[in-house]
Image (tube, rainbow, N blue to C red):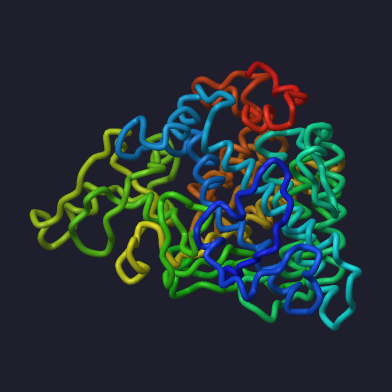
Amino acid sequence: MKKTILTTLIGGLLLLPQFGCEKFLDVDPAYTQDADNYFNTPVDYQRALTGAYDLMQGSFLSVWIGEIASDNTIAGGESVTDTKGLHEIDDMSHVAVNQELRNVFRWNYAGITRVNFIMENKNKIDFAGKENILAQASFLRAFYYFELVKFFGDVPLVVDKRLGADQVTSLDRTPKAEVYKQIEADLTYAASKLDWTAAEKGRVTKGAAIALLGKVQLYQDKFDEAAVTFQTLIDQNLYSLIPNYNQLFTVANEGHKETVFDVEYTGAEGGGYGCLICLEGNAGPGFQGIRQYKGPIYGDGNSYNLPTKNLYDAFALTDIRRDATILDIDAFIAKQAKPQDISYAKGAGGHTGYYNNKYIKKEGEIGLPDNDLTSPVNYKVIRYADVLLMAAEANARKASPDENKAKTYLNLVRKRVNLSDVTSSGQTLVSDIWNERRLELACEGHRYFDLVRTKQAATSLTGFVTGKHELFPIPQVEIDLAGGNWKQNPNY
């Protein structure tokens, strides 16, 4: 999506990241408006909505943490002090002073602030299409709050208004049950008003709202409700698994039938390392690329978020998803016609020999310089295979399990990659579904949160402390900005 410059001074919760970069400030004064004089035309609402979408472009950071904190990947990079916060998360040594966690907190609240600015002014004028704008905005607010609850648990809940600095200091953290209630309300509203298809590529649809609602219910162990929600989506027959797993993440095949919702990126506009949230391109592929690589197919990168041998070995030898997900760099080079002409460097931040083949810099998918930061590869927030596996889990874990339906959805995912049907039952079936999620969705940002919500983290992750690492710490600077009134998450 193309960034729209909003020059209204949108009051934010503890943050002003929406104006943290020069590109937001370098505006012709003739077009500036203050907040009270905005939302006078339908175009103003469209621009504000585009601004609310913008913060989704920081999703790459949530994806990194969702994998690096798990057994799927390590932080990697140039050194152990290169993006230090990721290495601390990798080691389970992270504390309340961590730049990456602060970015997650700030960026998602920036998105919420932009949505609340729209909602605060939703009745200012009437026009055709306003209801659709409000529905999209509701989805976005739900998405941002869901990210915050996954990471931090109880978080301040602010709806339909902006806050001044004096109000922030009297604001408390809201119990996550109440935040989840608001998330569900926003998604239910969005689903009731959105169409099944969007007029503009990259905008949310009814299907996206229903799928996210089911996921939110699953995260709360509302298995009966989640099963019904996912069934509503499945019964529409609008989505399907594409035949070739290897084509899921290519630029050339974007917008395929498996995409329920993705974050749109472009390679046509550059950016800088000083403000990663200001980027138009996806930073993930460049950061996850092969350091100082010279050879065919791929481009050079920064060797972050490197898959582990544990993940590589979890795949069956016959599972085509292994090589589609993980690039074994030395094996790849050995198969080339002139392996002696291919070279790369190992980062001092850790080297496993493996790279994220789903989101990696490739020839033909490279944006403008600095091309590390301008990949046009979209991030798949929700794809249909994820929906099927969540539906399988919900059916297997609801009060009166429907194991036949659970196995049907699980085996649809397995058949796509020519694997035999699962015939298990009971807890073994549930474990099989969880394992399938790891393999199908590896390196897409779900693993850590799956381990936490299913209470597998303590037995799967080295250094994980029960009663502590289920949540990340609230950034200390945000506690300080709130007047020191917030209680930190347990054991930090």
Outermost residue on the top side: it is 491
Asked if 84 appears above or below 122 in the picture, the reply is above
> What residue is drawn where x is 52% and y is 55%?
21
In the drawing, does residue 9 fall left or right of residue 62?
Answer: right
**For this rendering, which residue is in front, 412 or 127?**
127
Tell me where residue 36 sits by quadrant: bottom right
Q: How many marks?
A: 0
In the drawing, does residue 292 fall left or right of residue 485?
Answer: left
> What residue is drawn where x is 32% and y is 47%?
302
Inspect this view and state whether residue 348 appears. Answer: yes
Residue 51 in percent (x, y) is at: 65, 64
Quadrant in the picture for the C terminus: top right
Residue 456 in percent (x, y) is at: 62, 29
In the drawing, does residue 440 fall left or right of residue 222?
Answer: left
Inspect this view and state whether residue 318 appears. Answer: no
Residue 386 in percent (x, y) is at: 63, 55
Tell me where residue 190 sits by quadrant: bottom right
In the drawing, does residue 286 fall left or right of residue 444?
Answer: left
**For this rendering, which residue is in front, 407 or 30?**
30
**For this rendering, which residue is in front, 318 or 214?**
214
Residue 481 in percent (x, y) is at: 69, 32
